[in-house]
Image: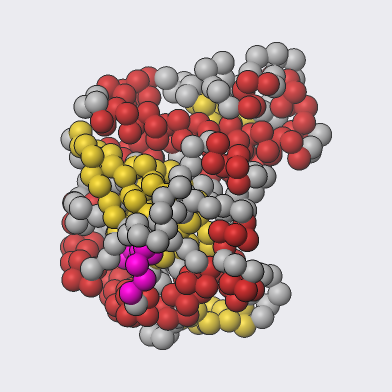
Amino acid sequence: MTDQSTTKFSYTLKATDGRARTGVIHTPRGDIRTPAFMPVGTAATVKAMMPESVAATGADILLGNTYHLMLRPTAERIDRLGGLHKFMNWDKPILTDSGGFQVMSLAGLRKLTEKGVTFKSHIDGSKHELTPERSMEIQKLLGSDIVMCFDECPALPADRKRIAESMRLSMRWAQRSRDAFGDRPGHALFGIMQGGLEADLREESAKALREIEFDGYAIGGLAVGEGQEAMFDCLDYAPGYLPEDKPRYLMGVGKPDDIVGAVKRGVDMMDCVLPSRSGRTGQVWTRHGVLNIKNARHQDDPRPIDENCTCPACQNYSRAYLHHVFRSNEMISGMLLTWHNLHYFQEIMQGMRDAISEGRFDAWEADFHANRAQGDI
Ligand SMILES: NCc1cc(CSc2ccccc2)c2nc(N)[nH]c(=O)c2c1
Ligand SMILES: [Zn+2]
């Protein structure tokens, strides 16, 4: 356990291979090996997982949601109870999103102004407001180690004018987030680049964020329906607009091949609900591709999901059993499939960290794609 009193927040770049990077983010609550995949713990839990199980998959950090926690149980209550780490029994780093993205995707009756956004809770219809200042206050009450700026991610389809206006609003909110965050040693504030798929707007956004100065820089506004090719086209230039000596976080990405392509293009941190959410629907991600355990062809299959996987699901259970408990809607189904998926995602990250360190990323990537059959396996 790192000495929380003296360790500041810092990033050490250890090796590069092409544009791919590997390094370590040092925080008072522990180190984060990059490239890193960050499981999402929306309502103070990674669904169907105990915190110690999340740690056992190899996760160094998990994510929380300002939007969900401000509505229930409220940030003030979590603060009174000792903060989010104590509340959810996770003593490693936590990153929290700033809430604006979730408001636009989940809440009702939203009103967006220069000041911020007002909305009605999707839980009970109560009225709330989020501003850069309030978002910083909530994330401070939660005690998160990495705080995200309050931003706006424009809904697609959007024309260039709308994307430019939205990005410039987010840059004004980034300055207000910075001012409200203040000086909190050991805690980090990340700026969020916007600008859609417009290279010049992305560059303008990066320039604005660099002038404000942040501990890390996120790439927002991607994986919002543009498709993998357009996302990769944007990632061919956007990470390069950001400082080399700070971590780069691609928000809300993605499937295994999205993650590999993003790391190849210089991304250091990613998050996605996919491994946990899809695990609960029976979708299982493996080195040979994706399968769905509810398919009848698994009902008599004595083999594990993946003979080469060291997770508890693959070590101790057959496909037939996992098919049975999924079909029977037993809780252990979501637990075991989520564990396997998170374990597999972390295995991909460890594979890339090793490959980049040893200068063999291209060979690792070729092997990764060669192993993936099409469709069910
Ligand atoms: N990939 C789409 C996406 C996802 C998230 C959510 S990432 C997340 C989710 C849960 C917990 C922590 C982070 C975003 N968050 C912000 N603030 N801005 C974006 O542009 C954006 C785009
Ligand atoms: Zn497994």
The quadrant in which the C terminus is found is: top right
Vertical comparison of 324 with 34: above or below: above
* Residue 146: percent from left, percent from top: 41, 61
Q: Which residues are magenta?
A: 183-191
Q: Reply above or below: 369 against 145.
A: above
Q: Which residue is pictured at 27% across the width and 51% down the height?
A: 11
Quarter occupied by residue 243: bottom left
Residue 202: x and y, percent?
A: 23, 62
Q: How is the image coloured?
A: secondary structure
Q: Residue at coordinates 63% horizontally, 20% vertically from top-left?
A: 315
Q: From the top left corner, tell me how far across and down residue 74 is, in percent.
A: 62, 73
Regarding residue 215, the answer to whether it shows in the image is: yes
Q: Is 244 displayed left or right of 24 in the figure? A: left
Please state which of residues 359 and 257 is positioned toward the viewer in this rendering: 359
- What residue sits 48% from the left and 56% below the top? 94
Relative image position of residue 175 (x, y in whole percent): 29, 77
Q: Viewed as shown, does residue 60 lie left or right of 41?
A: left
Q: Is residue 190 magenta?
A: yes
In reply to whether residue 373 is colored magenta, the answer given is no
Q: In the rendered view, would you say 121 is above or below 255?
A: below
> Does residue 208 show up?
no
Instruction: Determine whether, in the image, residue 180 is placed left or right of residue 81.
Output: left
Q: Give the quadrant of residue 95.
A: bottom left
